[in-house]
Amino acid sequence: MSDNIYLPQLARVAFIKDEVVGERAIKTFRVEAADGGDLFEHECGQCAMLSIFGRGESMISIASSPLIKEYKQFSIMRVGRVSSAFHDLAVGDVIGIRGPYGNDFPIDDWRGKNLYFIGGGCGLAPIWPLITTAVAQRADFKNITVFYGGRTSRDIMYRAELEKLRESVDVHLSIDKAEEGWEGYCGFVPAAVMDKDPVPDNSVAITCGPPIMIKYVIENLNKLGFADEQIYTTIENKMKCGLGKCGRCNVGKDYVCVKGPVYSWAVLKNLPEEY
């Protein structure tokens, strides 16, 4: 690879899956090095800058476990110019990729603990590498529980993968309002967490989703007895350079692309409420 930190590596799209269709469409992409070599290594929680030449670039959470070396996975919601361009891609198309950026979840510090993963909407993607890594190293952890919710049953991403997870961990799916045939929880994700009453002793809770969901999940976890140091989340301020140079993603003194996107609530709650 080039020593130029701004020069992306070429990657080829090897796989595309429609996760969610409609107005809030989400597609999952797997990309491989275009030259047949290796892409960079990453840790759980880190991001990569993806570019479509002539259309722009965007910072996206890496949604595959660092244990997987053959490809990097990204799940992208169609919300703007660049994300829409990604939704127009086909298998075999070439994009640019550079990274990894940001810090990571301290998973090594959590071995021997209970893990609670709490996601909503496209917020499942940033914590999916952590979930799949923990499951792959199942003997290193105690109970693993996944809470995940979508607006409707059609908005549940990674549906087949979540059903397979039930073989080794507790999975609780929810939708906002009742639907015919739905057997999971009906209601918002924070309420689903309270309903199951997770135990804070020797536990860590990791949450990601819409900001309002994260807010109430953290409030409920505190009510259940989780200390601020036991709660982790990610924030995704607009990141343009990934190097702490452009100042687009700063929260107070922190550049999220460098000091984040992973924060414990004990740290994050003391930053300005700009995020």
Image (cartoon, grey):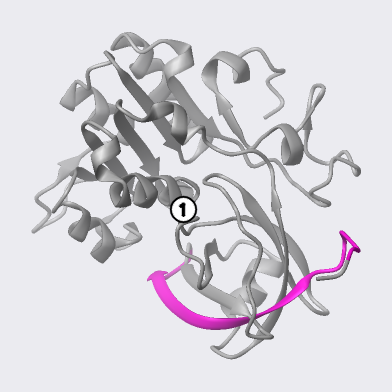
Q: State the image coordinates of residue 195 (x, y, percent, origin top left).
A: 17, 25
The secondary structure type at the circle numbered 1 is helix
Q: State the image coordinates of residue 157 (x, y, percent, origin top left).
A: 35, 60
Q: Residue at x 46, y 53 (%)?
A: 125
21 within the magenta span: yes
- The relative height of residue 139 versus residue 136 in the rendered view (above or below) is above
Q: Residue at x 46, y 41 (%)?
A: 209
Bounds of the magenta span?
A: 3-23
Could you tell me which quadrant the N terminus lies in? bottom right
Within 10 Å of disc 1 (Cα), the crowding (few <14, some 14-19, many 20+) is many
Amino acid bearing label 1:
Ala
Residue with the mark numbered 1: 125
Q: Residue at x 39, y 44 (%)?
A: 120
Q: State the image coordinates of residue 181 (x, y, percent, origin top left).
A: 8, 58
272 within the magenta span: no
- The relative height of residue 141 versus residue 77 in the rendered view (above or below) is above
